[in-house]
Image: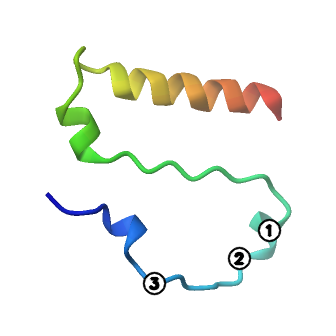
Amino acid sequence: MSADLAFVLEKDNIKLPRHIRKKNLIGINIIFLIILKEALPGIVMQNFIKLIHYNFRKI
């Protein structure tokens, strides 16, 4: 088993497009291994969807 690539890649500073810069952003990294270890099939995606809906209500 190895680390998720998102955590071992070198940081790259980029300039976001103007229409994105002033918005609140959330990055979600769904690691396939988490889905493989689900106790209940589909529960990971269900919870990510709930997280997204919760955050949209806060905007």
Residue furthest out toward the left: 1
Q: Residues within 10 Å of mark 3 (few under 14, many from 20)?
A: few
**Residue 10 in picture, x, y percent from top left:** 45, 84
Separation of disc 2 and disc 1 at Cα? 6 Å
Q: Which residue is mark 3?
A: 10
Tell me if label 2 and label 1 are in contact, CB under 8 Å. Answer: yes
Q: Is residue 4 left or right of residue 6?
A: left
Residue at 38% over, 45% down: 30
Residue at 64% over, 50% down: 26
Q: How is the image coloured?
A: rainbow
Residue at 64% over, 84% down: 14
Amino acid type at mark 1: Arg
**Residue 46 in picture, x, y percent from top left:** 42, 21
Amino acid type at mark 2: Leu
Q: Is residue 30 left or right of residue 58?
A: left
Q: Which label belongs to residue 56? A: none
Say which of marks 2 and 3 sits in front: 3
- The local secondary structure at tag 1 comes to helix
Q: Which residue is mark 1?
A: 21
Q: Nearer the viewer, residue 14 or 40?
A: 40
Tell me if label 2 and label 3 are in contact, CB under 8 Å. Answer: no
**Residue 35 in picture, x, y percent from top left:** 25, 34
Say which of marks 3 and 1 sits in front: 3
Query: Which quarter of the rendering shows the C terminus?
Result: top right
Q: Which residue is mark 2?
A: 16
- The local secondary structure at tag 3 comes to loop
The vertical placement of 44 against 14, above or below, is: above
Q: Which comes sooner in the sequence, label 3 or label 1?
A: 3
Amino acid type at mark 3: Glu
Q: Residues within 10 Å of mark 2 (few under 14, many from 20)?
A: few
Q: Residues within 10 Å of mark 1 (few under 14, many from 20)?
A: few
